[in-house]
Amino acid sequence: MNVSLVDLAPCKKLLKVEFGTEEVSAAIDEVATLYQKNVTVPGFRVGRAPREKVLNLHGKAIHQRAGQNLVEKGFQEAVKKENLKLVGNPRLEEDAPLESGKPFSFNITVELAPTFELPDYKGLSVTLEKHVVGDEQVDKAMLVLQERMCSYKDTDRSAGEKDVVVINYTGTCEGKPITEIVPGAQRIAKADNFWVRITKDSFLPGFTEQLVGLKAGDKKNIEVDFPADFVEPELAGKKGSFDITVVLVKEVELPALDDKFAGLYGVKTLEELRNRVHSDLEQDARYKEKQSIESQIANALLEKVDFELPDSLLELETAELVERVLQQNRERKVREEVILRGMPEIRANAAKQAASNLKLNFIFGKIAEVEKLKASEEEMRTRITVLAQMNKVPLQKFVKRLQENRGFNQIASEIVRNKVLELLKLHSVVKEVPAQVNA
């Protein structure tokens, strides 16, 4: 058997395999023997028909099966001989059929894992913004919890900061009704008894601030500038005008911070609630720090090395990311026509992110090889058990689902990836700075 490789692209090769006449004859004989033992030939008992009769009746099928056997055998041996790390699905190119007394050759297009030199991955510099959770942060979080349990009281006074104003409004853009410009933008164009709270950008940028000082029955024209990245492209960057009538002004009443309030969140005392909030904030802060460091490590590695990616993997990863964005938009009730208009940008962003994801996967995989990092059986069992519990699925049923979807490899990859990240973090050079406080 002769094997040769032809470069088609950095990660794509044409694998050419050729068998000599003796190997072809042996393959035909092997299949013919199986047929001779198992097929029925009129006038003969099973297994007793002469080979010539079997070949006359089933010669085409025998040659076809022998060719398939040689392709399977030749492909496996060629991959092993050339030490190829395949990705994606091999594609058998159309070739001449197998014939007795002649050599047999076939070509398969394969995609390979990229080859590259690992950069220095130990000693990467990262900056850790250390988040300190104090009373001020807890107080802000407690206020959020209060607002979730707030009530609304009608008032005759003028609207002020944080009040809720119930309004009727009709909107235009550059002198035209908004529905004439964007027929599907009904919510922006017109509404009755619309509740809007006077907080920054709670509806449209600059809108709610102009409600301050109004009372029930007041009318006003409010002008806004639609943002350049506004969800409705036809309105983006343009000026909007809204004729509003105030129906009601409602004062937001917060519940008292006491043990009774704590009971609304399933604890007995206010102190216990504050402690829980503090713990949650600490956990969130540590998670954000972890995410930040891992992101910096990933970006540092991507800056140090570059290589071509297999087309099929890039296409698949891009398609999955696009579908994820589309699903998120649909869950947010974004109209289909808006989604369609944004598809070029969605695809471009997805392709860029897909390339980064795949490159990191290959880099992490190579680091795992060098460092001999693997997922142990105990780690696999623990992770599978945890996932089954999280998904509220019986363990045996969850394992069966993983077997059907080839999910074990994905779990093993995640375990190894986490080990690589822990190794990189352990050997990184961390500069700790105070976290920036948002105004």
Image (tube, rainbow, N blue to C red):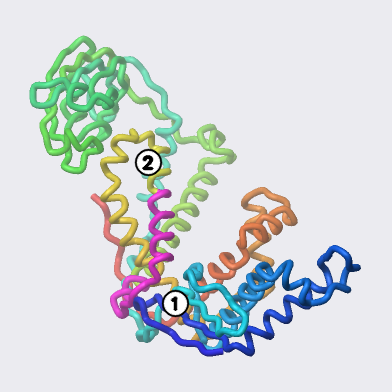
| 389 is higher (above) or lower (below) than 62 | above
Front position in the image: 255 or 281: 281
Image spot of residue 252 (x, y percent): 35, 25
The residue beneath circle 1 is 113
Q: In the image as oriented, which residue stretches furthest toward the right?
A: 45
The residue beneath circle 2 is 329
Question: Which residue lies at the image location 63% right of the left edge and 70% below the top edge?
Answer: 64
Residue 109 appearing in the image: yes
| 20 is higher (above) or lower (below) than 160 | below
In the drawing, does residue 250 fall left or right of residue 29? left
Front position in the image: 66 or 416: 66
Badge 1: how crowded within 10 Å, few (<14), some, or many (20+)? Answer: some
Image spot of residue 2 (x, y percent): 52, 89
| 355 is higher (above) or lower (below) than 263 | below
Front position in the image: 113 or 232: 113
Q: Secondary structure at mark 1?
A: loop
| 284 is higher (above) or lower (below) than 44 | above
Magenta-tinted stretch: 297-324
* Amino acid type shown at disc 1: Ala
**Magenta-colored stretch includes residue 62:** no
Question: Which residue lies at the image location 62% right of the left edge and 72% below the top edge?
Answer: 68
Question: Which label sits in the foreground, 1 or 2?
Answer: 1
* Amino acid type shown at disc 2: Asn
**Magenta-colored stretch includes residue 305:** yes
In the drawing, does residue 148 fall left or right of residue 395? left
